[in-house]
């Protein structure tokens, strides 16, 4: 069984910082791209940031709305990604979901997994 275990999040004031972490646990043969998506009330799910599994730390892609404020990094040895969120604004308020593409065994196709979601609330 594979699980994406999220931690971090909570309440912050505008201009503050929060850090989200996501651990991919269970039987994993190959861990590919990981990242975070978010969904604000009444809005569609949107990409926040993703990072590939490249040997040099991976390649990151950020949503325009978070560029320069958020930093995504991965620890391949621990199957973990960390999203450092700085200069938070009210519009960052949303439920944040960890996402990972992985193979459970060498004989199975890659599949996408999601975490349960963690609330981030930014107050003005």
Image (cartoon, rainbow, N blue to C red):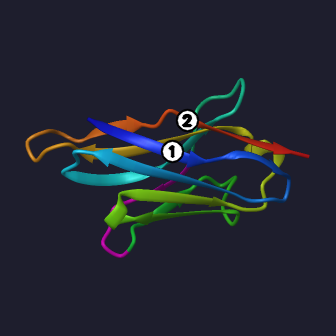
Query: 80 left or right of 124?
Result: left
Q: Is residue 8 above or below residue 68?
A: above
Q: Nearer the viewer, residue 97 or 26?
A: 26
Number of dots carrying numbers: 2
In the rendered image, residue 51 lying in the magenta stretch gets the answer yes
Q: Are marks 1 and 2 in contact (CB under 8 Å)?
A: yes
Q: Which mark is residue 17?
A: none
Counting from the top left corner in percent of width and height, residue 46 is at 58, 39
Q: Which residue, as the protein is rendered here, is positioned at the far bottom? A: 56
The residue beneath circle 1 is 6
Residue 3 image-quadrant placement? top left
Counting from the top left corner in percent of width and height, residue 17 is at 74, 59
Query: 15 left or right of 106?
Result: right
Q: Which residue, as the protein is rendered here, is positioned at the far top? A: 42
Q: Which mark is residue 117?
A: 2
In the rendered image, residue 75 lying in the magenta stretch gets the answer no
Which quadrant of the rendered structure holds the N terminus? top left
Q: Nearer the viewer, residue 41 or 82?
A: 82
Q: Is residue 87 above or below residue 104?
A: below
Bounds of the magenta span?
48-56
Counting from the top left corner in percent of width and height, residue 117 is at 55, 35
Disc 1 and disc 2: Cα gap in Å? 7 Å
Q: Which residue, as the protein is rendered here, is positioned at the far right? A: 124
Query: 35 left or right of 107?
Result: right
Counting from the top left corner in percent of width and height, residue 24 is at 36, 48
Identify the residue at image location x=8%, y=42%.
107
């Amino acid at each position: 069984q594979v699980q994406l275990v999220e931690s971090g999040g909570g309440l912050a004031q505008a201009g503050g910082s929060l850090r989200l972490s996501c651990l991919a646990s269970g039987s994993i043969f190959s861990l590919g791209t990981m990242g975070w998506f978010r969904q604000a009330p009444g809005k569609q799910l949107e990409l926040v940031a993703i990072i590939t599994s490249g040997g040099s730390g991976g390649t990151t892609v950020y949503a325009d709305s978070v560029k320069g404020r958020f930093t995504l990094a991965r620890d391949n040895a621990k199957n973990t990604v960390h999203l450092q969120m700085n200069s938070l604004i009210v519009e960052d308020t949303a439920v944040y979901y960890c996402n990972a593409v992985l193979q459970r065994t060498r004989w199975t196709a890659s599949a996408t997994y999601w975490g349960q979601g963690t609330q981030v609330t930014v107050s003005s």
